[in-house]
Image (spheres, grey):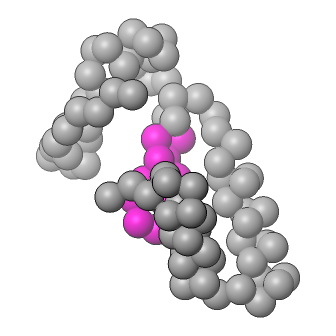
Amino acid sequence: MYAKTIQVRKRGTITLPVTIREKYHLEEGDPITLVDLGEGVFLSPKRSLLPKLAQEIERLREKHGVSTEELIAGVAEQRAKYGTDVE
């Protein structure tokens, strides 16, 4: 896994490190998908299925009457249960 801190610049721009641009063959003008997860954001160098997945989760959450807070608490419980709790 690769982690690096980058800064948001004037007008909200960010610069992706060259290692990431090379790894994913990104060039100027290529699309990046940004998904707001509520507690953070997810960036994907290609068109992501995540927005569709998020819509389906939201549809099911509403269908079954689960609040967003209950959903988040359930995810936290599962992370703790399987040792994938991330701070």
Main secondary structure type of the part rendered in magenta: strand
Confirm whether the magenta stretch covers residue 34: yes
Q: Does residue 27 appear anywhere in the picture?
A: no
Q: Does residue 39 appear anywhere in the picture?
A: yes
Is residue 58 shown above or below 20?
A: below
| x, y percent for residue 43 | 46, 41
Q: Nearer the viewer, residue 31 or 20?
A: 20
Q: Quadrant of residue 85?
A: bottom left
Is residue 27 shown above or below 8?
A: above
| x, y percent for residue 18 | 28, 15
Q: Name the residue located 25 percent from the left edge and 48 percent from the top edge.
A: 12
Query: Magenta region: which residues?
Result: 33-43
Q: Name the residue located 59 percent from the left edge and 29 percent from the top edge.
A: 46
| x, y percent for residue 60 | 81, 73
| x, y percent for residue 19 | 31, 14
Q: Name the residue located 55 percent from the left edge and 71 percent from the top edge.
A: 77
